[in-house]
Structures are given as structure tokens and as C-alpha cells.
Image (cartoon, helix red, strand yellow):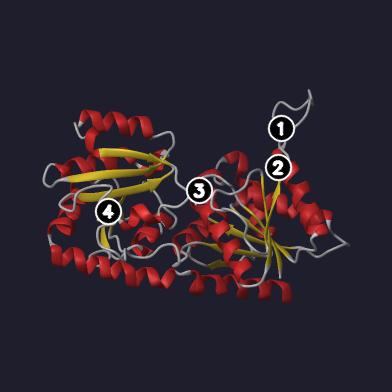
Amino acid sequence: MRIGITCYPTYGGSGAVATELGLELGRRGHEVHMISYASPFRLRGYSERVFFHEVDVSGGNYPLFKFFPYTLALAAKQHEVALHERLDLMHVHYAIPHATTAYLAKQMLEGVRDLKVVTTLHGTDITLVGQEHSFFSITKFSIERSDAVTAVSEYLRDETYKAFGCDGCTIDVIPNFINPAEYFPATQPGQRRAIAPESTKVLVHVSNFREVKRVVDVVRIFAKVRAQVPAVLMLIGDGPGRQDAEEEARTLKVEKDVRFVGKLDSTADLLRAADLFLLPSETESFGLAALEAMACGVPVVASRVGGIPELVVHGETGALAPVGSVDTMASAALQLLCDPARGRAAREAAIRRAELFTADRVVPQYEQLYRRVLES
């Protein structure tokens, strides 16, 4: 199959999953064309049968345009690539604006090529952006006009039905996945020595530091843990919440043990060195970062929200608690860190659980969906 994929190229779950999907499809013999305004951060180097097409956003001197019309430029590029590369379908990640531009590209090809459109919903495109009054009707329209729609969790599927109705639209649940060749447990002792002594616990959080990630809560949980056991906190990523997190670390006097690592293309090496992963988010449609941690053998303490309970099994692969319950999360973290038997059992359970979400289990579900759409 010849498949076009459009996603946001920036640091975040939807772009990561879309890019990993493209790479895996290429490995499985399909021809994949990634289309966005910049190369996705997970698209590293040359990959056979995977090609990148950049949308020109340099604009021009158009005095009537207060803002450059990226959506129109994207639709034009999707049409161009679909036409010249003879694409069978366009798989777009995030409803707005990608499903909308793909529908426009499809209409531009009418009578020339029957381009199918598959839309994958990732979370805030439904729970936040799509429900804004300005975008509600076009989000609903774009979903309903897609040839197939998927959601990354049962929670997100149900939220979409609840918010939009989606008349005549069936939403398939296909979860996020990891590449086990990259995300796997530590195989050699001492991999963490560059981070902390063996007697010091390593806690990790990975996100784009948006408000919904509650990075300040991460620091507060860590401070309570640090008061009981020697520990360091690795904060991977960056975003608007970083300054507040830095200030909270100083206020709680743990700044010397909190390390802001910044954005990384791959977090696997640091995850393998960790003892615990913290994800106290306000909402999560799935929790890809938690899955990556579990695949590396790291138990997870997270909020009991959204799609997280579909991934993290409370009392087995880690612990879940209500949003904002810093004390409860810190207590759960200490139990996992200070009880060797409980921590070892959670690590082993996390690895087993993550094996249900590997590329070789999940990507065939997309291939089956593609065939169904093309045969319809």
C-alpha cells in the first residue's frame, strides 16, 4: 500500500505514535509519505520506504493575510503528494486541522483518484480543541466524513461519541504501541551509575510540560519521597510549566536533586535507569510515556483518569490515585521504592503488560483497517 501520514511534528504523543507507525509500516513493506510543516521529531535519519514532504510555510508578502493559511497549504500538499505518489489512503493524526485538510484534498482528487481518509483521534483534539465553539461543527464534520476513524483508547472513543454523536460513524479502538527494539528493560547492571549511586532512587517524568501534565505535582510528590529516601528526579521534556516546576523545587528545597533534562528524541536509556515513573496528569487519553516506561521495566504511579486505567493496572504494574492527590501518590511511590519484593513484582508485571502493546501486535490492526477501507 501507498500511505500518506500527516501529524504534528512537535514533541508529543500523537506525533510520536504517527511517526513510529510510519516507520513500522515501511519495515513491513508499505510505501509511506509523511506530510507536515517540519520533519517529525521521531523521524531520525533515512528509513527505507519512508519519505518526508515538507509543507511550505514561508508564506509571502500577502497583505490580506494577517495569519498564514497553513491549513490550505497543507491540503494542497496532501493533494499534490496523493496525486504524484499515487497514494491509496491518507492517515491523519489529530482531527483538527488534519482530518479537515485531508477531506479537502480528497475532494480535489474527485474523478482522478479515490483517496481514502483514515483519522486517528489522540485526545485533546476531542476533549479540548474540538469542543471549543469555534471548532465544534468542523470537528464533527471532519470525523463523520472520514472513511474510518480510530481512537487510542476506549475512554477517548466514548468521549467522542458523547461529545459529537458522530452520526453513522463507527470508531475503532487501536491503542498506542511501542517498538520493543528500542524500549526494553535494562540488560546490564550499573546502567544508572551516571545518574545516581545505586543506593539512590531515580524517579522520572516525561511530557511536554503543559498545564494538564501537572508537573508541579510531580515535584511535590518527589519532595515527599525525597524526605524519606535518597532520590533524584529526572524531568524529560520542556514547555510552559517548566518555570513553575523550577520554582516549586526551590520552594521545597529539592532543586539540587531535580534535573531538567530537556527534550530528547529517545527517552529509552534514561527510562531503563529509573526506579519509578510519575504521571499525575489532569487528563490522558492513553499515556504513551507511561507505556514506554513500563516496557523498560519501570512501574508507574499515575492519576486514575482517562485511558490510563486501560494501561496501568492498579496494584500490579504500579498505582493509580485521584487527580491532585499528592500524598496518596507519594505514599504509593514509597511503597514501591522501599519494599524490594513489591517493587520487583511491579517491574515484572509492567514488562508483561507492555508486551500487549508492541508494534507487532498493534500495527497489523491498522493494516487490517486499511484493507477494509480500501475494499469498501
Q: Give the residue number, with chain letter if any, for mark 3.
A: 124
Instruction: Check contact, mark 2 vs mark 1: CB within 8 A.
Output: no
Q: CA distance from mark 2 to mark 1?
A: 9 Å
Q: From the top left corner, tell me how far across and down residue 239 is, in percent.
A: 44, 36
Q: Nearer the viewer, residue 62 or 126?
A: 62
Q: From the top left corner, tell me how far across and down residue 188 is, in percent.
A: 29, 64
143 vs 180, left or right, is right
159 vs 25, left or right, is left
The local secondary structure at tag 3 comes to: helix
- Checking the image for residue 174, the label placed there is none
Indicate which label's residue lies in the foreground, 3 or 2. 2
Q: Could you say which quadrant of the image residue 32 lies in?
A: bottom right
Q: Does any portion of residue 6 appear in the rendered image?
A: yes
Indicate which label's residue lies in the foreground, 1 or 3. 1
Q: Could you say which quadrant of the image residue 218 lies in?
A: top left
At 18% from the left and 59% from the top, the residue drawn is 336
Q: Amino acid at mark 2?
A: Thr
Asked if 28 appears above or below 206 in the picture, the reply is below
Q: CA distance from mark 2 to mark 4?
A: 45 Å
Q: CA distance from mark 4 to mark 3?
A: 35 Å
* Mark 2 residue crowding within 10 angstroms, few (<14) / some (14–19) / many (20+): some
Q: Give the residue number, with chain letter if any, for mark 4.
A: 192
Q: Amino acid at mark 1?
A: Phe
Q: Amino acid at mark 3?
A: Thr
Asked if 217 appears above or below 108 in the picture, the reply is above
The local secondary structure at tag 4 comes to: loop
At 52% from the left and 54% from the top, the residue drawn is 16
- Checking the image for residue 68, the label placed there is 1
Q: Could you tell which of marks 3 and 2 lies nearer the N-terminus? A: 2
Q: Give the residue number, with chain letter if any, for mark 2.
A: 71
Q: Amino acid at mark 4?
A: Arg
